[in-house]
Image (cartoon, grey):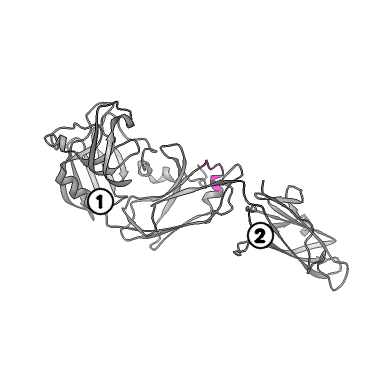
Amino acid sequence: MPLVSVGALTACGGIAASAPKGPPVQVDLGAASGTRAVQAGDRLMVTAHGGVLTEVTVADPKGRQLAGTLGAGGTVWTSRAKTAPDTKYSVLARTKNAQGGTGEAKESLTTAAADLLNKLVLSPGSQGATVGVAQPIMITFDFPVTDRAAVERRLKVTTDNGTTGSWGWVKDYSGKDRVDWRPETYWKPGTEVGLRAELNGVDSGGGRYFGKDYDLHFTIGRSQVIKVDLDRRYLSFVEDGEETRRIPVSAGRPDGDHATWTGTFPLMAKEGTIDMNSETVGLGDSYHRTVRDAMKLTDSGTYAHAAPWNADKVGRVNASAGCIGLTDADADWLYGKVQVGDPFEVTGSSVRGEADRNNGIGDWAVDWSRWQKYSALSSNS
């Protein structure tokens, strides 16, 4: 484990600062657990002998302080925050002895580097991206996060218009821990969004630390909502609240294996021309073909895309294996218009019903009051 052994705080190389009258106060530094060795994840304890502590300041090289409290009549100071790995801390303790003499003691300690690290992936995935009005901030972790509250406290979202939102913890389709921040309602177009994740040195649980801080900035683009009606077999392209185009579609066949999921699906990715193989989504060898204008909606393989093999069924019959098929011309047009994060609101009759919340970006599958309860800092979480 990352640790460093420390002893008494010193003043100018001595045991303690000299006091103008009376004997100097001896100041010791160690871990709150009672050991003299301080390891990452410990709380620091500063103890005065022969007097009291009047002030204690512990800071890292960036000036970030470990907050703490005095106790035991002013003879003990204990940090509320835990120490981080591979970090040098400067400690300043001001003291007073029984005769009223004052002094100060200084020391520094450096914790060892962490043996175990946790890493993460941010989405949107590129700085300065422009995304749709349903795009949440998403942070996916390589390893489980057991101290979710400690992590969430270090995440700060800023907007240029005071957008209300909340973090919510989910499991992604592969089972990884993910925390998303979504607004109460769809974003206002043009909103500038920033994320500051001050996670360097934070223990995500089990002694697995983060090794850096993270920043992300992106902009919300124009309002575009794609409303898909499975029963009437068309989609409406709605810009700034007005329908600007209606496009015929052929969705999934009405059975338990092929029906199209319903729900709100922020567009996950524009993948262009891809190879689709039914065996990868548990449908046997019913199809294996190359499709173009692939717009990803779920992790289980739901896309909107060009489907020329179903051209005679588009707008007439739901005949796909679960995707939303369009004619070549309409798919080309839609692909050129949509942004990652644009919501596809799929409604109508479906034998399969709503997609699971972890199948893609399911943040809009629950109402606002319920979403807030998924925060690790919610009293009801």
C-alpha gap between disc 2 and disc 1:
48 Å
Which amino acid does the dot numbered 1 rest on? Val
Is residue 330 or residue 365 the one in the foreground?
Answer: 330
Residue indicated by mark 1:
338
Mark 1 is surrounded, within 10 Å at the Cα level, by few (under 14), some (14 to 19) or many (20 or more) other residues, namely: many
The x and y percentages for residue 262 are: 28, 37
**Dominant SS type (magenta):** loop
The tally of labels here is: 2
The answer to whether residue 148 is magenta is yes
Q: Is residue 173 left or right of residue 11?
A: left
Q: Is residue 36 above or below residue 309?
A: below
Q: Residue furthest left?
A: 312
| Residue 373 seen from this side | no
Above/below status of 296 relative to 253: below
- Return the x and y of residue 127 as percentages of the image width and height: 39, 58
Using a 10 Å C-alpha cutoff, classify the residue at mark 2 as few (fewer than 14 neighbours), some (14 to 19) or many (20 or more).
some
Frontmost of labels 2 and 1 is: 2
Judge whether 37 appears above or below 22 on screen.
above
Question: In the picture provided, is 178 more to the left or to the right than 7?
Answer: left
Q: Is residue 140 left or right of residue 225?
A: right
Label 2: state its secondary structure. strand
Name the secondary structure under disc 1: loop
Residue 31 drawn in magenta: no
First to last magenta residue range: 143-149
Q: Which mark is residue 308?
A: none
Residue type at mark 2 is Lys
Residue 78 in view (yes/no): yes
Extreme right residue here? 22
Please give left or right for residue 115 compared with residue 381 in the image.
right
Mark 2 = which residue?
A: 88
Residue 354, located in which quarter of the rendered image?
Answer: top left
